[in-house]
Structures are given as C-alpha cells and as structure tokens.
Image (cartoon, helix red, strand yellow):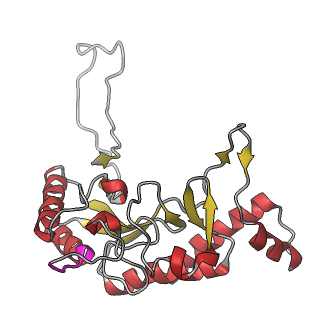
C-alpha cells in the first residue's frame, strides 16, 4: 500500500542557552488546526493493492480488504481512496460498464458468490470511522496490464468510435462531448447509489506524449474532434483547446456532484 504522509517537526533555535531564559507558557492561543486528511490510495489496476490476485474467492477478497481497513485504522488514517474504475470497467455492480478483470480474472464476470465490493467497502470503512472515496480514471479505456479480452459491453466494443489507440494503450478522446457525457454518467451513477464520501479522479488529462522509434513525439490522434471544433469557429490553439476540454470536464463533474 502506498501512503502520502505530511510530516511536521519543531526544532529549537540553534545556539539558544537553556540557562539564559526561563520558560513560561504563552497567553496567546493558536487557532484550531484545520481538519487533517490522512488517507491512502488502494489501487486495483494490475492488482497492485487490492485484490492482490485475480483468482481470489469472494471471502478472500473481503478478508484482504478488511486487513487493509484494519491497518488504516491502526495508523489513524481517516480516508481511503479505492480505485473502482481503472479503464472503463467497474469494481462494483454497474449497468453502464462491465465488471473489471482485476476482480475476477475475466472482464464482465461478476464475483461468485455475488457481492458488491464498493458497497462492502463503504460499510467496512464507515464501521471504523474512515471515509471511503471512489477513485476513477475518467479517460483510460485500456491498460497495459489487461490480460483478458474486452467484453461485449466494454466501450472499446460497444462504442469504438470514442476510443483512440495511442502507443500501447487505449484512451477516450477528451475533446468529444460524448466521452464527457458517458464518463460523467458513470461517476454520477456511483454518487447516487453509494454512500461514498468523495470522488477522486486520476489521469484526468491527455496522455503523456508517446515517442516513435526515432524518438519523435507521436501526436495524440484527436484530429477529428479538433477539426470539428476548428470548423465550428473555435479560435483556441490545439494545446489551449485540449486544456479547456479538461477544464470543462472537471467543472461539469464538480457542479453535477
């Protein structure tokens, strides 16, 4: 498990002499500290953190999650960020996207015996006084660690016109309004149906540049959406237009949540 910790310390002034002054308590009261966010990421992609393997039984998956939550409680953390959508797939029951292969080893296959991991995670986190935040990757459509075939309901099969092949990965095009609509629908579905305490987005930007064999940067293949914008009278540069696409997505997500 990976933790991001912010540590503070106080040091005595160099050269101060204990015999040159007498300590007395200050009459000044400091302001109350802002509430601390002490959290940890729980990555499902590639089975990094949870579940540790793709062949675990339902009870083994639950036991692993409970061990993580117990550890978080013992460390006095107050939030856990659970990755529930690595690449247009779901580690929860969804009618919009297929079950993740990282959960069962096969995309589209539900856990057996059946349970809803996100519902279970919310309950177990709240039992321990810990917030549970749902972590989404909004624009990834296919990851290098994927091993099973895409299911018929995966976006690469159901709506391939929204998907871009870039390097060795598959991405949704952030410049396409249909991509925004689909991704927002997925995230808002979780907001409505689960008692999550927050929504977390990761990789909510265009992918890092890919280089060819000669070391030259390969353009991200968003030419069709860029031309649609330009032909419609858009005046932003390509780079500013891409940044604005991300700005609009984040703004929509915030306002709708």
For image coordinates 37% across by 73% down, the residue present is 90
Quadrant housing residue 145: bottom left
Residue 157 lies, in percent from the top left, at: 52, 78
Q: Is residue 79 left or right of residue 250?
A: left
Residue 30 lies, in percent from the top left, at: 33, 49
Name the chief secondary structure element in magenta.
Answer: loop
Residue 165 lies, in percent from the top left, at: 62, 62
| The residue stretch that appears in magenta | 113-118
Give the answer, above or below, for where 23 lies relative to 103.
Answer: above
Q: How many discs mark residues in the rendered view?
A: 0
For image coordinates 41% across by 72% down, the residue present is 89
For image coordinates 18% across by 56% down, the residue present is 68
Task: Confirm whether residue 177 shows in the render.
Answer: yes
For image coordinates 32% across by 63% down, the residue present is 102
45 falls in the magenta region: no
Give the answer, above or below, for where 24 lies relative to 69.
Answer: above
């Amino acid at each position: 498990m990976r933790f991001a910790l912010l540590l503070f310390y106080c040091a005595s002034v160099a050269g101060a002499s204990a015999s040159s002054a007498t300590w007395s308590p200050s009459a000044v009261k400091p302001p109350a500290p802002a509430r601390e966010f002490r959290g940890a990421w729980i990555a499902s992609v590639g089975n990094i953190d949870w579940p540790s393997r793709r062949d675990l039984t339902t009870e083994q998956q639950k036991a692993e999650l409970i061990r993580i939550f117990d550890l978080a409680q013992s460390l006095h953390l107050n939030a856990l960020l659970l990755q529930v959508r690595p690449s247009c797939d779901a580690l929860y029951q969804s009618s919009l996207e297929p079950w993740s292969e990282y959960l069962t080893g096969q995309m589209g296959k539900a856990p057996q015996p059946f349970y809803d991991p996100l519902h279970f995670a919310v309950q177990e986190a709240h039992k321990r006084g810990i917030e549970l935040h749902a972590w989404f990757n909004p624009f990834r459509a296919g990851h290098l660690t994927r091993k099973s075939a895409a299911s018929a309901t995966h976006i690469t099969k159901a709506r391939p016109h929204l998907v871009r092949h870039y390097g060795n990965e598959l991405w949704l095009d952030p410049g396409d309004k249909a991509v925004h609509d689909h991704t927002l629908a997925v995230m808002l579905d979780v907001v409505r149906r689960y008692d999550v305490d927050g929504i977390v987005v990761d990789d909510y930007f265009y992918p890092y540049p890919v280089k060819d064999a000669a070391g030259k940067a390969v353009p991200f293949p968003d030419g069709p959406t860029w031309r649609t914008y330009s032909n419609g009278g858009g005046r932003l540069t390509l780079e500013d237009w891409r940044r604005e696409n991300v700005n609009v997505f984040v703004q929509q997500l915030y306002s709708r949540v």
